[in-house]
Amino acid sequence: LRGASGRVQASGGYSADAALLNFYGSKDTLGGHKDDAELDLSQPLVSVSLGCDAVFLLGGTTKGVRPTAMLVRSGDVVVLSGRSRSCFHGVPRIFSKTPRRGGVAGGGKRSPSPSPSLRGYLDEHRINVSVRMVGRGAAGGGGGGEEDGGAGV
C-alpha cells in the first residue's frame, strides 16, 4: 500500500484523509455504484483487496455501458483515477477458500504469515480497504486528471 500510495501522491496534490473498511462474506455482493460523495472527484481512490478473490466490474459513467470484469486477488491494488473515477463499479462475486500467494497481503516473501484464526477468516471473507481524499486537497485538486487514464490493477 505504501508503494501504491507514493505513486498516487506523485501525481500531485493528493493526501488521503479517510479510509473505509468493508468486510464481505463469500456470498456477499456489492452492487454497481459510484463513489461520488467526496468534495474533489479529481482525486484518486485507492482500493486494496485482502482475503478471497473477487470479480470486480468497472463500467462507464452510466449504467448503460457494459462493464469490464477483472479478477482481484488478495494483495491487489486498484486505483480509480481520471475518467474511471466517475465510473460505476461493483463486486458481483466473491470466491471462497481461495489459495493466496503468500501472507495476508499476498504476493511476496516479505508478507507475514497470518495467524490460523485470521487465515481461516480470510478463506471465507474478503476485506477491502478504500483510501481516499474526502476533503479538498491543498492545491484545490491536481493530479488524477482526465488525461491520466483510468483504473489500474
Image: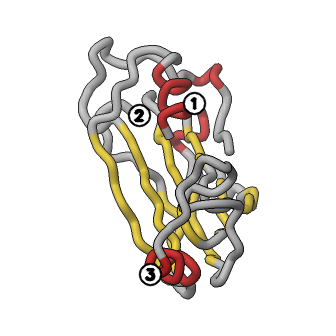
Instruction: Tell me where residue 133 sits by quadrant.
Output: top left
Q: Which residue type carries mark 2?
A: Leu
Q: Which residue type carries mark 3?
A: Ser
Q: Earlier in the sequence, mark 2 or mark 1?
A: 2
SS class of the residue under badge 2?
A: loop
Real-space Cα distance between discs 2 and 3?
38 Å
Please state the horizontal and vertical placement of residue 40, each as a whole percent of the image.
35, 30
State left or right for residue 8 relative to residue 137: right
Please state the horizontal and vertical placement of residue 105, each as a whole percent of the image.
56, 55
Structural crowding at the residue carrying mark 3, measured as other residues with C-alpha within 10 Å and reported as few (<14), some (14–19) or many (≥20): few
State left or right for residue 118 relative to residue 141: right
Mark nearer the viewer, 1 or 3: 3
Residue 66 seen in the current view? no
SS class of the residue under badge 1?
A: helix
Q: Pointer 2: what residue?
A: 41
Q: Nearer the viewer, residue 63 or 42?
A: 42
Residues tagged 1 and 3 counted as in contact (Cβ below 8 A): no
Task: Using the image, determine if residue 6 lies above or below residue 106.
Answer: above
Q: Earlier in the sequence, mark 1 or mark 3?
A: 1
Please state the horizontal and vertical placement of residue 21, each as a whole percent of the image.
36, 60
* Colour pattern: secondary structure
Q: Earlier in the sequence, mark 2 or mark 3?
A: 2
Mark nearer the viewer, 2 or 3: 3
Task: Using the image, determine if residue 153 lies above or below residue 114.
Answer: above
Please state the horizontal and vertical placement of residue 24, each as a whole percent of the image.
46, 76
Q: Pointer 1: what residue?
A: 82
User: Which of the labelled discs sits on residue 117, or is there none?
Assistant: 3
* Residue furthest out toward the bottom: 27
Q: Nearer the viewer, residue 63 or 93?
A: 93
Task: Using the image, determine if residue 104 lies above or below residue 120.
Answer: above
